[in-house]
């Protein structure tokens, strides 16, 4: 987390109180993923909370890898997560090369 990060909700300028937390990573779409030791900053003025998840793309790649190696049937949420990862990878590849998407 950057030092002196300002709150975008209440325009508080100064240090947000940061601490390491255990976070249920519901933002992934998979409600059973838990992150341990991520940095959470809280605004002392309005209580706004900001998470810093380092290497989020690598984290999502790791989650996708684990899902692909699992035996058994994937849930709808797991399929949706994998599909989103695939779309991200395709657009990332297109953006970093001279390739273009076919209509």
Image: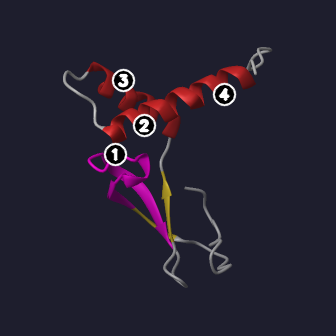
Distance from disc 3 to disc 4, alpha carbons, whole Å, reads: 19 Å
Marked residue nearer the N-terminal end (4 or 2): 2
How far from the left and from the top, in percent, is residue 58? 48, 31
The alpha-carbon separation of the residues under discs 2 and 1 comes to 8 Å
Q: Quadrant of the C terminus?
A: top right
Question: Which stretch is magenta?
Answer: 20-42
Q: Mark 2 vs mark 3: which is more N-terminal?
A: 3
Q: Nearer the viewer, mark 3 or mark 4?
A: 4
Between discs 3 and 1, the one toward the N terminus: 1
At 34% from the left and 56% from the top, the residue drawn is: 23
Q: Quickly name the residue at label 4.
A: 91
Task: Identify the residue position indicated by label 1 in the image.
Answer: 30
Question: SS at mark 3?
Answer: helix
Can residue 52 be spotted in the picture? Answer: yes
What residue is rendered at 62% in x and 72% in y? 7
96 or 81: nearer the viewer: 81
Residue 68 appears in which quarter of the rendering?
top left
């Amino acid at each position: 987390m950057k030092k002196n990060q300002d709150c975008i909700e209440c325009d508080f300028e100064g240090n947000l109180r940061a601490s390491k937390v255990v976070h249920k990573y519901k933002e992934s779409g998979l409600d059973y993923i838990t992150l341990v030791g991520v940095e959470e900053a809280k605004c002392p003025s309005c209580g706004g909370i900001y998470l810093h998840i380092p290497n989020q793309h690598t984290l999502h790649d790791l989650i996708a890898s684990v899902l692909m190696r699992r035996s058994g049937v994937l849930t709808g949420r797991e399929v949706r997560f994998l599909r989103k990862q695939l779309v991200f990878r395709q657009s990332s590849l297109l953006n970093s090369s001279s390739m273009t998407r076919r209509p």
